[in-house]
Image (tube, rainbow, N blue to C red):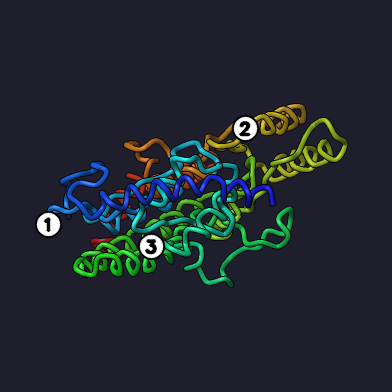
Amino acid sequence: MGVCRLIRLVLLPALALLALAGCGNSGSSGSGTGAGAGGAEGGGRLYRVVATVGMAADLVRRVGGGRVEVQQLMGSGVDPHLYKPTRDDIRDLMSGDLIVSVGLLLEGRMEETISRLSERQRVLVLGSSIPPGMLLIDEEGSGGHPDPHVWMDASLWSRSVPAIVTALSEGQPEYAGEFAARGAALLAELSALHEFGVACLQSVPEERRVLVTSHDAFRYFGRAYGVEVLGVQGISTESEAGLLRVNELVDLLVSRGVSAVFSETSVSQKNMQALIEGAGSRGWQVVLGGELFSDAMGESGTSAGTYAGMLEHNLTTVTRALGGRVPEGGFAAWQKVQEAIRE
Ligand SMILES: [Zn+2]
């Protein structure tokens, strides 16, 4: 209830702003961001897409190419589960020709705002383009709701590409051919990325394919690439139940010869230390295998600042730390070989 009222209060002034912004849009320059780039030869402004998280924004950029301007509301290191839209975010959302979100309650505190805006604006919820039967259900905590971390499986996330092609083509029918071609290229790339991931993790000895990490963002990753995933979010060494859980995990690390646990960029790594120390006291060395990207991509301009780069980082970090082998040259070399085979 409190949330509803809050959103209404924020929306009213934002509506007033939109009325002002609306006048500018039909005129010459609009906001001025990204002016003159690529598809705006006609002198108008570029088609504006406002995306919530990087994983969604990146796919839209790839399909849209120079024909769209994509604004991403949450940057690297931001936790979308907790992120609360600011006044500026709401104004930006309202100024978009298209709003793109993941949905499935990932953007927990933004979901209601977006759903209200959908009454008068185009909204594309990427999670809705994934067949419900392919979603994992989160039994703990959220009352049987689908797990929203669908981008952790490249084959699953790629299912949102046709919906992006359709939405952009509806917005700018004159470029539909371009969007379809870029969409097809992106689908081929994501399919290769998926196969690369399978090849990486298959090189890890079977009993060691265990991914211990801080929060439950990796269940789709585990299902897609054949790794057992154990999240330790919420465990605490201060309660008896927490200690019991730590001991269980330590037992598993020792008995299966698992030598690494992983931290995440958007979650604290404090809990992992208890596991490393626990295993150490039993004479088994476990290291922090590296930092994984869970709910946000890396800094823009870096390799992990793209969706494919983010997933490649996760796949290769886990593979190497668990004792597997990454195909030489990484995903870039792998993809070239796949393309050559296809030709
Ligand atoms: Zn998450």
| CA gap, disc 1 and disc 2 | 49 Å
Residue 285 location (% of width, % of height) = 66, 30
- Is residue 83 left or right of 207 when viewed as pictured? left
Which residue lies under the disc numbered 2?
268
Which residue lies under the disc numbered 3?
191
Is 24 drawn above or below residue 124 in the view shown? above
Whether residue 312 is visible: no
Amino acid on which the number 1 mark rests in the picture = Gly
Residue 42 badge: 1
Residue 281 location (% of width, % of height) = 76, 27
Frontmost residue, 182 versus 177? 177
Q: Name the residue at 73% across, 44% down.
A: 252
Whether residue 199 is visible: yes
Frontmost residue, 7 versus 290? 7
Question: Of callouts 3 and 1, which one flags the residue occurring earlier in the amino acid sequence?
Answer: 1
Amino acid on which the number 3 mark rests in the picture = Ser
Q: Are marks 1 and 2 in contact (CB under 8 Å)?
A: no
Q: Secondary structure under badge 1?
A: loop
Frontmost residue, 80 versus 59? 80
Which of discs 2 and 3 lies nearer the camera? The answer is 2
Q: Name the residue at 42% across, 38% down.
A: 298
Q: Name the residue at 85% across, 40% down.
A: 241
Q: Secondary structure under badge 3?
A: helix
Amino acid on which the number 2 mark rests in the picture = Ser
Q: Quadrant of residue 155?
A: bottom left
Residue 320 location (% of width, % of height) = 49, 41
Q: Secondary structure under badge 2?
A: loop
- Quarter of the figure with the C terminus: bottom left
Q: For label 1, count other residues whose C-alpha is less than 10 Å away and answer few (under 14), some (14-19) or many (20+).
A: few
Name the residue furthest right. Answer: 240
Q: For label 2, count other residues whose C-alpha is less than 10 Å away and answer few (under 14), some (14-19) or many (20+).
A: few
